[in-house]
Image (cartoon, rainbow, N blue to C red):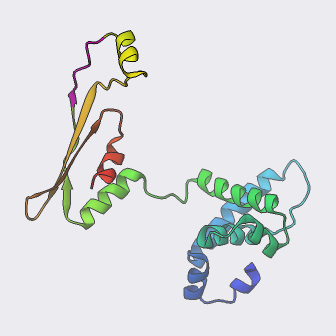
Amino acid sequence: MRYSDALEYDDARFRRLTGIKKSTFQEMLLILTEAHRRKKAKGGRPNKLQIPEMLMMALEYLREYRTYFHIGAGYGLSESNAYETIRWVEDTLIRSGAFTLPGKKAEKKRWFAKRGILELSLSTRPRRRWSVPKKAKTALFGQKEAAYHTIKAQVVVDKQSRRIVCTAFDVGRCHDFRQGFIHP
């Protein structure tokens, strides 16, 4: 949908269409306008779309997960131009630092807090390595055996009942965040 058509919507319908408020859209527009001005300061071919249309196109992609071909066809662009435009909008907004999502650690804490669960941190314990020489291992098993030096253990406890919800054990190379969600 074109920006001029979306402007006629009230705030609730605009947010339903794009996923953001009109005020947030205006903030994004200011950032993109400034970045576009800096980009074109040296000269260059003018863009086929105005900046509001570029932003609407990126929001359509993020909201609806349509293919670049379909979005480009809706705006009169080729698939590659639609990709480049959406990528530029995303990169510019990310680089600005004004619009960020919480990191994985914050999301994990929120997930556990919502369910009233306390996660105890992982403990890492050394693990004994084989004493068989590498050549003998290769001859015995036909391939090299990976030797991990540590084992990680994780305990998740319910705050209210003080009961253990689950435990997880994994090799030392597994990331802490992954372990909690692989073994809930």
Q: In the image, is residue 56 above or below residue 137?
A: below
Quick one: quadrant of the N terminus?
bottom right
Of 149 and 63, nearer the camera is 149
Is residue 113 shown left or right of residue 63?
left
Q: Position of residue 40 (x, y in %)?
A: 84, 53
Q: Position of residue 12 (x, y in %)?
A: 54, 87
Is residue 101 shown left or right of residue 60?
left
Is residue 136 shown left or right of residue 98?
left
Of 94 and 42, nearer the camera is 94
Q: Residue at x 66, y 61 (%)?
A: 31
Of 111 and 150, nearer the camera is 150
Q: Quadrant of residue 30?
A: bottom right
Q: Residue at x 66, y 54 (%)?
A: 92
**Most common secondary structure along the magenta stretch:** loop
Quick one: quadrant of the C terminus?
bottom left
Please state the extent of the stretch shown in magenta in the rendering. Answer: 125-132
Q: Quadrant of residue 5?
A: bottom right
